[in-house]
Amino acid sequence: MMRFRKSMYIAPSVRNPRKIKWKLRTGRGSLDIYVMVLNHDSGKLEYFHNGMLKQKILHNRDMDIVGLAGTTGECIELIERMTADAHDITGQYDIYRYLMQV
């Protein structure tokens, strides 16, 4: 099941996040959007092109979308920002634990 976090990290190139969320929920997707997902099984943060959400293997997976970006470079920048925020708030570099608290 796909859930969007209330406190999402959104890259500057993502113009209309509300519309992007609607497209992702309805299975339409977008050519230039990468999603950042919390993997509850491994406790890690993953990012991939939104087209991957159409794969059957991901349909039954429990995932929280925590970020949207336009390129892989922006994904890395958002991860850097998440890491800095995690360290500032918790004193540790554990992004998973930080995002579960926020």
Image (cartoon, rainbow, N blue to C red):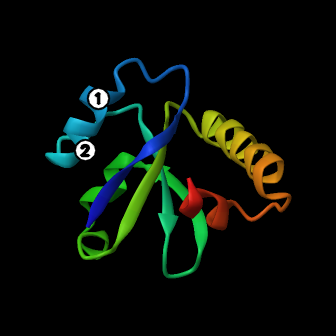
Relative height, residue 23 to residue 87 (above, below):
above
Direction from residue 44 to residue 86 in the image, left or right:
right
- Name which residue lies at 62% across and 33% down: 74
Mark 1 and mark 2: Cα distance apart in space: 10 Å
Viewer-side residue, 87 vs 54: 87
Extreme-right residue of the structure:
91
Residue 24 image label: 2
Residue type (three-letter) at the residue carrying disc 2: Leu
Q: Secondary structure at mark 2?
A: helix
- Name which residue lies at 50% across and 70% down: 39
Question: For residue 1, which quarter of the picture?
Answer: bottom left
Residue 84 coordinates in the image, percent (x, y):
80, 44
- Name which residue lies at 82% across and 46% down: 88
Direction from residue 58 to residue 95 in the image, left or right:
right
Q: Secondary structure at mark 1?
A: helix
Residue 49 coordinates in the image, percent (x, y):
43, 47
Q: Which residue is mark 1?
A: 18
Viewer-side residue, 61 vs 66: 66
Extreme-left residue of the structure:
26
Is label 1 or label 2 in front? 1
